[in-house]
């Protein structure tokens, strides 16, 4: 047992659990707290099927690498499975069981092991989830948008056709009256002035004739 690096296997177990979509995966270093084991790996699964998948993946991987299973508990349980490798004890639990038994609180003085080599995977997953639109576009709403666009286009086309077919009267510009030339107007005024002058002379001559006649 001393020749095996159980911390490396604990990180491998955590990686397998995350690959199987387990949640809240943690590794507790309990070497200074108990002689029972060196590390606990704790993960939350959503169903019995997921518990089986996570445990099966860990057991197959560790068997390939020559790590012997010491014991397996609660194989028939749908809420909690324990697989013990001596230096590592792995707990795969449902959320309800994990909240009920609170293993992290019981081993609250244990050191939390960070496995940074797996953090980029989690960060990448978070980016993928963040990139998803908050509101998905359903096929129905997409169809309605296409339908509305089609109706609008057809309506615009009809309006254009109606405008083309509507007869329009050509409005002729009003004829502007041409003013009489200035020379013509000046000529007419001079004629009137000469006529008035002649009339004045005739009146003056008549007045003289009348005056002479009175003297005789």
Image: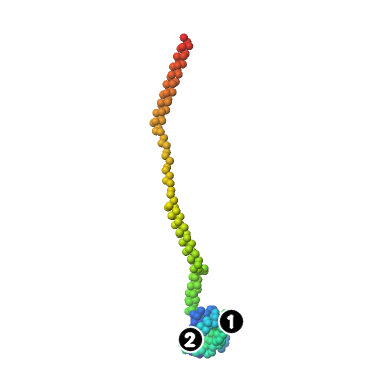
Question: CA–CA distance between discs 1 and 2?
Answer: 25 Å
| In the rendered image, the vertical position of residue 74 relative to residue 190, given as above or below | below
**Residue at screen point 43% across, 19% down:** 202
Q: Secondary structure at mark 1?
A: helix
Q: Is residue 76 above or below residue 185?
A: below
Instruction: Mark yes or no: residue 7 visible.
Output: no
Q: Would you say residue 17 is visible in this rendering?
A: yes
Secondary structure category for the residue under label 2: helix
Which residue in the structure is indicated by mark 1? Answer: 97
Seen as rendered, the residue at the extreme top is 216
For label 1, count other residues whose C-alpha is less than 10 Å away and answer few (under 14), some (14-19) or many (20+).
some
Between discs 1 and 2, the one toward the N terminus: 2
Tell which of 105 and 136 is nearer to you: 136
Q: Position of residue 200 (x, y in %)?
A: 44, 20
Q: Which residue lies at the image location 42% right of the left edge and 26% below the top edge?
A: 192
- How far across and how far down the image is residue 58, in percent? 50, 85
Q: Quadrant of residue 198?
A: top left
Which residue: 49% across, 82% down?
16
- Residue 122, x across and y down, in percent: 49, 76
Residue 194 shown left or right of residue 87 in the figure = left
Image height of 151 relative to 120, above or below: above
Q: Nearer the viewer, residue 47 or 14?
A: 47
Q: Nearer the viewer, residue 194 or 122?
A: 194
- Say which of 136 and 3 sits in front: 136
**Contact check, label 1 and label 2, Cβ < 8 Å:** no
Write down the residue under mark 2. 60
Horizontal side of residue 56 vs 187, given as left or right: right
Q: Quadrant of residue 105?
A: bottom right
Identify the disc placed on residue 150. Answer: none
- The type of colouring in the image is rainbow
Query: Residue shown at 43%/49% (left/top)?
Result: 167
Above or below 149: residue 216? above
């Amino acid at each position: 047992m001393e020749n095996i690096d159980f911390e490396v296997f604990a990180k491998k177990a955590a990686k397998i659990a995350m690959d199987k979509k387990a949640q809240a995966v943690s590794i507790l270093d309990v070497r200074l707290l108990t002689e029972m084991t060196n590390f606990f790996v704790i993960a939350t699964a959503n169903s019995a099927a997921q518990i089986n998948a996570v445990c099966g993946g860990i057991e197959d991987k560790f068997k390939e690498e020559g790590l012997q299973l010491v014991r397996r508990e609660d194989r028939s349980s749908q809420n909690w499975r324990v697989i013990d490798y001596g230096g590592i004890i792995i707990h795969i639990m449902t959320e309800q069981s994990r909240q009920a038994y609170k293993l992290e609180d019981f081993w609250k003085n244990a050191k939390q092991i960070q496995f940074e080599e797996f953090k980029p995977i989690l960060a990448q997953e978070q980016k993928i989830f963040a990139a998803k639109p908050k509101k998905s576009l359903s096929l129905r709403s997409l169809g309605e948008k296409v339908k509305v666009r089609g109706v609008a286009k057809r309506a615009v086309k009809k309006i254009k056709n109606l405008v083309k077919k509507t007869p329009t009267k050509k409005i002729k510009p009003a004829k502007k009256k041409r003013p009489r030339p200035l020379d013509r107007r000046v000529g007419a005024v001079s004629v009137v002035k000469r006529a008035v002058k002649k009339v004045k002379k005739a009146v003056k001559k008549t007045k003289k004739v009348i005056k002479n006649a009175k003297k005789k």
